[in-house]
Amino acid sequence: MKIKDMLKLSYFKDSIIHTNIKGQESNIIQSISVMEYPIETFVRENEVVLSTCIYCDDIKIFEELVKDLKKSNATALVISTGCYITQIPSKIISLAEQIKLPIISIPWEIPFSNIVEEMYQKLESEQLLFSKKFEEIRDKLILMYLERVPLYDVVLFINNVLGYNIAILNHNYELVTKDSKEVLEKKEFVNGYTFFYIIQGKSKLYAYLLMNMEEEISINNIPKLNELVETNIINPLMLWFERENEFKVGEYKKQEKFLLNMIDDKENNKISLINKGRILGVELAEHYIVLVGLVDNTTLTEMTKDEYGINELKDAFSNVALYASLKYIIAFRKPYLIAFIEDRDLSYSDIEKFILEVEKLVIVSYKNLKINWGISDIHDKDIGIYHAYMDAMTNLKLGIKYRDEHIHSKEAILGYELFNEMVKNRIIMENVSKIMNELTTEDSNELLVTLHKYFENGRNISKTAEKMYLHRQSLIYRLKKIESLTGMSLDKPRDLFTLELSVYLTLFSEIAY
C-alpha cells in the first residue's frame, strides 16, 4: 500500500498534503499507529503515524516530533487539525520537506479508530492478495513444468505476473534462460532493490535467481518475501533443473559406454562405429580430437564425495563445447576424463583455451582443482579412434614426466618425438642398455638418477648437489664412479653426448612402453 492508495480511502477525502516532496505519494505503507510526543522507539519502519500534536504548540517539541519520526523511518505524519493544532507552521513544513517526511492533515471530526480500522482492512487485504499471487504463480509453474514449457518462457511469466525483473544465472553468472552466449547486462539490475536466491538440489547447486524490485521493501517484510519466493518460485523452478540433470546423466551414461567400447577395441570397424555414433548424435565420420584428463587424487577425492562431482566436470565440459558450437562425446574412467571434440581446424592454442574455460567453471566448486591433460595429434586426420586415444595418453604421460605445465600436446613435447623413434630401434637400445646397466643394480638406480639430475641442472655441480640434498663432494664422488663404471669421461664432448642421450632414452622408454 502507498500514500496515494491511502488518500483514496473514505476517511481521507478531505485530507490535505502540506509537503511537496518528489515521489511522496509512492511511499510504502505497511502499518498505522496513533502516537503523541515523545515518540521514543515505538514507531515501526514504513508506518503512518496519526497524531493530534497535543504538545506541539511549542515549536521545538513539534520539530523534535518530526525529526524522531524520520529517524524511525516512518512513512508519513497525519495530523488531526482543529483542536490542538489549527494550522501547521511553515517552519515545520520546510523541515519536513528537507528531511523528506510527508505531512498530511485531516479534520478533527474524523475518529482515529475509524481510520485505523479501515487502514488495517486495506493492508490485510493487500497482504492476502500478495501471498495469493505467489500461490497462483506456484500452481501455474507446476502446470508449466508438466507441459514442458521452456525455462525462458517461465521467467517471462514470472516477470509479467510480479512486475519484477527476474534472471536465472549459472555458475559463471551467464543467463541460462536466453542465448547461452549472452551474459547478464548488470545495468538491468542497478536501479531498485535486488534479491539473490540459490536454486539447489540435494547437494548440487543448479543456478542463481536474481529478483529486482523497483520499489523499496521494508526490512521487516524481507523474511516473508523470502519465504514466499522460496516456497512458490524456487522450489517449482528446481523441477526444471532436476529434469535436465536426470536427462544429462542418462546421456552421459550412454555416451560413456559407447566411448569406452571404442577406445578398448583396437580393431574397431569404422562403418559400424559411425552408425552407432549417429544414434547418439555423434558424427564420427568427421575428425575428432581426443583429450585425456588425469584428475589429481586430491581433486578426485573431493569430486567423489557425492554423486554430482564427476558430473559437474562433465557439465562444465559440455557447457564450453556447446558455447563453442562443437560436437563432443565424453566419458570418465577413474582417474581419467576422456573426451572427443569435433575438429574444426582447431589449433593447439584453441584447445588449450577450451580446457582453461572448462577448468574455470569447475574451480568454482573445487578450489584445489588439478588436472593434467593430454591432447592427440591435430594434424593426423586419418588416425583411428584407438590410436588417437593412445596418442593423447602418451602425450599426457610424457608431459607429466618432462614438463611443468599441465596441458600436453604433441607440439609441446616435439623434442621427445626423436626419442620415440629411437627407442623403437633395437640396436640403439641394446647399446644404451649396455651403458646404463653399469649404473643400475636390482636394489638401486642411484647413479642413474644422479646422472639424470646432473644433466637436468645443466651440469652445474653446486646446483645439482643442492637439488639432490647432497654434499658437493658426495656428488663429485658419484660422478667419478659413473665415469669409472662406464669407461666414459664427462669432460669429453662425444662421451658426454652418449651418456646424456642414453639417460633420456632409458627414462623415456620406461614411461612410453
Image (spheres, grey):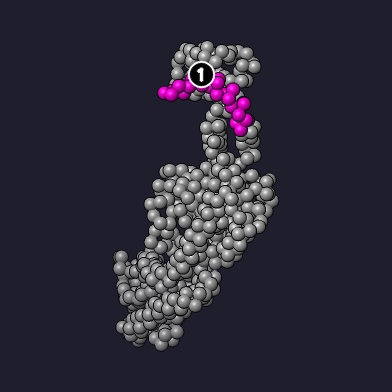
What residue do we see at 48% from left, 15% from top? 478
Residue 37 in view of the camera: yes
- Helix, strand or loop at label 1? It is helix
What residue do we see at 46% from left, 53% from top? 310
> In the rendering, at what x and y percent does residue 480 appear?
51, 12
Q: Is residue 445 magenta?
A: yes
The residue wearing badge 1 is 438
Tell which of 103 and 420 is nearer to you.
420
Query: What is the quadrant of the N terminus in the image?
Result: bottom left
Residue 407 in view of the camera: no
Left or right: residue 219 compared with residue 381: left
Determine which quarter of the picture holds residue 205: bottom left
What residue do we see at 68% from left, 49% from top? 381
Residue 21 vs 312, above or below: the answer is below
Residue 11 vs 215, above or below: the answer is below
Q: Which residues are magenta?
A: 423-447
